[in-house]
Amino acid sequence: MACGIAISAFLAFRVIDNKAAFPAVNSARIEVKPAVDLIEENYNSKNFDGLYKFKYKVEIIDTAGNILYNNYNKTTGREDLKSASGYDLNFTALNKNVVRYSSPVIVNGNQKATAVFYIAKNTVVKDNSHEEVFMIFLPAAISLLLTIIILISHIFTAKNQIITPINEIEYSTDAIIKGNFDKKIKYNNDTEVGRLCASFEMMRDELKNSIERERRLETSRKELITCISHDLRTPISSIKAYVEGIMDGIAKDKETLNRYLSVINKKTQVLTKLIDDLFEHCQIELDKLDIKKREMYSGEYLEHIRDELSLEFKSSGQTFESAENMPNVLIKIDPVRIEQVIYNLIQNARKYTPEDGKISFMAEIEDDYLKVSVKDNGAGVDLTDLPFIFDKFYRGEKMRNSDKGGSGLGLSICKYIVERHGGQIFVESNENGSNFYFVIPKL
Ligand code: ADP
């Protein structure tokens, strides 16, 4: 736009300049040519009457400045030859409607006189001011048009890329306020507003997930109270029944007595685990779970755990696999808590794997981390449960309705402990089994 105005201004100055500096000399010359011819032809006879037919005034001035003839009255006089020569710019400037043009009268190769013509301006100076105005303002007009087109296209772009997505954000926000987290927004990722929309979408997704998680947790919590009362009542009832049996003398021989005592022992372990989990969960919630880290080598530590585990598996139908030598690197851990994590993963593997299943306990070095894994060939974690099993109180859908006791707290406690060691815990699972593993940094 500014460019167009600049061009227009430049043209306007040029035209003004040209108008002053370039009067229509050629037009005047052409206009008077027949008259000059007539004068020259008749100069010797001095019969200039033919000049009356021309529409303009003519003066013929001899070389001494005397007016020999004019075609408007018969008076004679003198004329200033200097001012009457050529196209008189000064005269033209002073006289609005007339231009003065003079031409030499040449007879036989000699200038005999000067013919001065007073011509109506409009016959030699064409009034093309309309065209000039048009030409001057054309660049400005084109620029204005272009500016309007660009503005309109900007408005359209702004509407598509800014206003529409912002409206969508507004609708989606309203929907979120009303509890509907499913209203997705459409956007183009290449713009600033697009990026804002992408962040908004991420926030909406995150909110939706956390609300769903909250709801699931709430359900889990309610179920937990039912489960805990059930899980506490069941072992307590059977312990009570077996103790009463022993007191009533039903276990007559040593073998039966041992069997009764072994059941009581198993049920007590279940109770202890349940109560321990609940206790530790409360401590985590209160941020009071004690973790006392110290530097130690991993080899001997892991091998000791492996040996204890293989002893425990001796009396079960499940197979236990482990490595001869465990990697030996310097780590800084709370040995009791990390052992607790490993035992929890092993207990889960045993719980969720059939009687003739196989469980392995391995460790390896991966980059700057020590990786410890517990693998089983059980039924695996359902895909729908997978994202939530490390959440507090979450129990797999199938496990909730099974006779396998549990608080849904074990894995969340493991996760907490591993993360307090600067590590991470993961699971890979399918219908052929699960692989739970955690990594902790080596020193
Ligand atoms: P729970 O007391 O129910 O075992 P956890 O927090 O230890 O609680 O485990 C949470 C859920 O993860 C379990 O209810 C179960 O659905 C699933 N899970 C954990 N370990 C395994 C495994 N080795 N195989 C299959 N599912 C598992």
Image (spheres, rainbow, N blue to C red):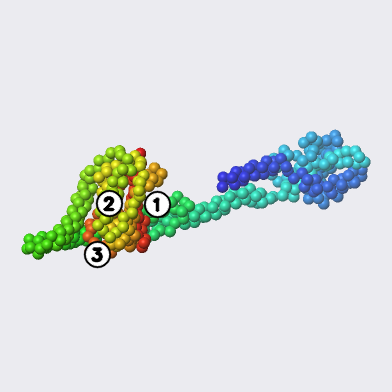
Marker disc for residue 309: 2
**Cα distance, mark 1 to mark 3?**
42 Å
**Cα distance, mark 2 to mark 1?**
48 Å
Residue receiving disc 3:
402
Under circle 1, the secondary element is: helix
Mark in the foreground, 2 or 3: 2
Residue occupying image coordinates x 25% and y 43%: 291
**Viewer-closest of 431 and 221:** 431
Mark in the foreground, 1 or 3: 3
Residue 224 visible in the snapshot: yes
**Cα distance, mark 2 to mark 3?**
26 Å
Q: Earlier in the sequence, mark 2 or mark 3?
A: 2
Residue 237, position in %: x, y? 13, 62
Under circle 3, the secondary element is: loop
Under circle 2, the secondary element is: helix
Q: Earlier in the sequence, mark 1 or mark 3?
A: 1
**Viewer-closest of 74 and 409:** 409
**Amino acid type at image mark 1:** Ser
Q: Using the image, determine if residue 239 lies above or below residue 72.
A: below
Residue 284, position in %: x, y? 23, 48
Residue receiving disc 1:
199
